[in-house]
C-alpha cells in the first residue's frame, strides 16, 4: 500500500501548471532551467520560481532533428524539440530560460534555443580545482544574481539568499531521509515511485509547502515500515544506477532492472542523489557559499571529475549495493568516455559487478537491454 501523501508528488507537475499561471498573472516571473548547475536559491531569492525543462520524452525529438544533427544526445534533442514545437506547458510558462556551458551539445543547442525564448547563459569553468576557477564561477553567480534583479525588480540581498539556502538545505535533507527510507526493504515504494518523488522537485512552486509534504511522506513511510513484516520476496540485488539523467518518459532502464527482480536502491545521477547531496554552509558570504556548492557538482563535463567516483563510492557503502549500472545516452561523449574510468575504479576499489549500457529514448533496444540486464543481475546475485 502506497503512503497517502505519494499522490501529492505524483500530481505535482499538473498542479504546478495552474499555480504558475496564477503566479504569473500576479506579476511573478518563471525561470526555466535545464541542469542542476542552475543556482535555484538565487532564482527564488530574486522573487522568481525555477522550473525544470529537461526533455525526457521521445515525441519532441522529431521536431529538433529538423535543425539539430540526429547524432546528438536524446536529452538535448528532446529539450529543444519541446521548445520549437511549443508542446511543453512549462516551457510556455517560462519568461526566460537559463543555461550553463556544460557539454558541447547542450551549449550549442542553447544558441538555437535563444531564438525561441530569452536565454541567459552562465559560463562554467571545466576544472573545479583549477586556480581561478572558484573566483570565475563566483563572478558568474553574482552576474546571474544581478541580471535577475534587473528582470524581477527584486534584489537578492544576503538575507534573502540566506533564507533560500536554509530552505533548500532543509528540502535536500528531508529528501535524503525519504530516499533512505524508500529504499528500505519493507518500504512500499518501488524505484519508479522514488523517481517520481525525486523528479517532483523540478516543479515546486511553494517550497515550504513542498518540504512539509516531504516530512509527511517520511512519517507515513516510517509508520508503514514499522508495521510491516519483512518482505516476502527474498533479498533482491541492490543496484546503484549512475550516468546520464533519467525521468518520466525515459526510465526504461530503471523499469527493466525492476522487472528483472532487482531493486534500484540508489540513483547517483542528476535526477537522483547528485541533486540533493552537498548542503550549503548557512553562515558566511551566501553568494560564495552558493557558488562553491554548485561548482562542486561532479558532472562529466568537468575534467578531471574525481568527485563522481567519490560520490558513487560513498553511496555504494551507504546503500549496501550489490552491483552498479552506468547508463549513457547515445552520443553523450563525456559520460560514455568516463564510464571506462568509473568501471576501472569500481573494479579496483569496490569489487562489485559493473554494467555499462548505452541507449536512447526509443524502445527499439528494449529486449536487448533486458537480456543484458538479466545476465548482469545473475552475476550480481552471486
Ligand atoms: S549531467 Fe551534467 S549537464 Fe546534464 S543535468 Fe547533470 S550536471 Fe547538468
Ligand atoms: S546527457 Fe550528456 S550529452 Fe546529454 S545533455 Fe547531459 S551531459 Fe550533455
Image (cartoon, grey):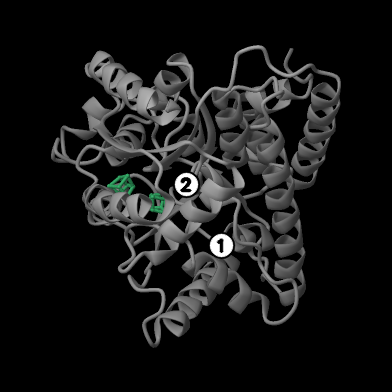
Give the mark count.
2
Up/down of 141 relative to 361, above or below: below
Q: Earlier in the sequence, mark 1 or mark 2?
A: 1
The one nearer the camera, 185 or 99, is 185
Q: At 81% across and 39% down in the image, what residue appears? A: 215
The one nearer the camera, 319 or 12, is 319
Q: At 44% across and 30% down in the image, what residue appears? A: 88
Q: Nearer the viewer, mark 1 or mark 2?
A: 2
> How dense is the environment of label 2, judged by Cα within 10 Å: few (below 14), some, or many (20 and up)?
many
Mark 2 CB lies closer than 8 A to ligand 1: yes
Q: Is residue 257 left or right of residue 162?
A: left
- Quadrant of the image occupied by residue 330: top left
User: Which residue has dot 2 on it?
Assistant: 270
> How dense is the environment of label 1, judged by Cα within 10 Å: few (below 14), some, or many (20 and up)?
some
Up/down of 309 relative to 95, above or below: below
Does dot 1 land on a helix, a strand or a loop? helix
Q: At 71% across and 23% down in the image, what residue appears? A: 186
Give the x, y percent position of residue 73.
24, 40
Up/down of 71 relative to 150, above or below: above
Q: Is residue 348 left or right of residue 65?
A: right
- Quadrant of the image occupied by residue 359: top left
Q: Is residue 281 left or right of residue 258?
A: right
User: Which residue has dot 1 on it?
Assistant: 151
> Distance of mark 1 from mark 2, alpha carbons?
28 Å
Amino acid at each position: 500500500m502506497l503512503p497517502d501523501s505519494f499522490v501529492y508528488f505524483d500530481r505535482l507537475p499538473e498542479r504546478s501548471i495552474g499555480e504558475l499561471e496564477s503566479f504569473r498573472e500576479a506579476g511573478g516571473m518563471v525561470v526555466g532551467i535545464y541542469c542542476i548547475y542552475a543556482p535555484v536559491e538565487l532564482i527564488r531569492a530574486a522573487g522568481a520560481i525555477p522550473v525544470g525543462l529537461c526533455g525526457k520524452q521521445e515525441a519532441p525529438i522529431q521536431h529538433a532533428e529538423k535543425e539539430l544533427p540526429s547524432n546528438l544526445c536524446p536529452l538535448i534533442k528532446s529539450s529543444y524539440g519541446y521548445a520549437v514545437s511549443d508542446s511543453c506547458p512549462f516551457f510556455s510558462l517560462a519568461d526566460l530560460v537559463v543555461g550553463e556551458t556544460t557539454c558541447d551539445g547542450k551549449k550549442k543547442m542553447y544558441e538555437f534555443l535563444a531564438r525561441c525564448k530569452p536565454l541567459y547563459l552562465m559560463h562554467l569553468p571545466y576544472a573545479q580545482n583549477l586556480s581561478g576557477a572558484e573566483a570565475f564561477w563566483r563572478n558568474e553567480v553574482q552576474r546571474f544574481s544581478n541580471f535577475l534583479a534587473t528582470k524581477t525588480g527584486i534584489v537578492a540581498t544576503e538575507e534573502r539568499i540566506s533564507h533560500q539556502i536554509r530552505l533548500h538545505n532543509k528540502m535536500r535533507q528531508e529528501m535524503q531521509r525519504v530516499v533512505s527510507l524508500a529504499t528500505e526493504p519493507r518500504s512500499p515504494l518501488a524505484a519508479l515511485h522514488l523517481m517520481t518523488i525525486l523528479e517532483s522537485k523540478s516543479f515546486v512552486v511553494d517550497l515550504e509547502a513542498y518540504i512539509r509534504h516531504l516530512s509527511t511522506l517520511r512519517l507515513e513511510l516510517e509508520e508503514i515500515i514499522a508495521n510491516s513484516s519483512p518482505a516476502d520476496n527474498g533479498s533482491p540485488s541492490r543496484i546503484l544506477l549512475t550516468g546520464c539523467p533519467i525521468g518520466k518518459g525515459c526510465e526504461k532502464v530503471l523499469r527493466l532492472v525492476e522487472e528483472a527482480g532487482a531493486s534500484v536502491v540508489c540513483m547517483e545521477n542528476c535526477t537522483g542523489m547528485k541533486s540533493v547531496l552537498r548542503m550549503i554552509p548557512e553562515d558566511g558570504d551566501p553568494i560564495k557559499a552558493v557558488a562553491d556548492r554548485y561548482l562542486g557538482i561532479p558532472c562529466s563535463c568537468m575534467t578531471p571529475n574525481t568527485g563522481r567516483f567519490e560520490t558513487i563510492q560513498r553511496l555504494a557503502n551507504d546503500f549496501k549495493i550489490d552491483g552498479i549500472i552506468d547508463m549513457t545516452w547515445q552520443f553523450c561523449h563525456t559520460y560514455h568516455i568516463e564510464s571506462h574510468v568509473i568501471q576501472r575504479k569500481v573494479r579496483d576499489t569496490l569489487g562489485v559487478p559493473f554494467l555499462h549500457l548505452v541507449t536512447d529514448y526509443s524502445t527499439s533496444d528494449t529486449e536487448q537491454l533486458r537480456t543484458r540486464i538479466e545476465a548482469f543481475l545473475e552475476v550480481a546475485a552471486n
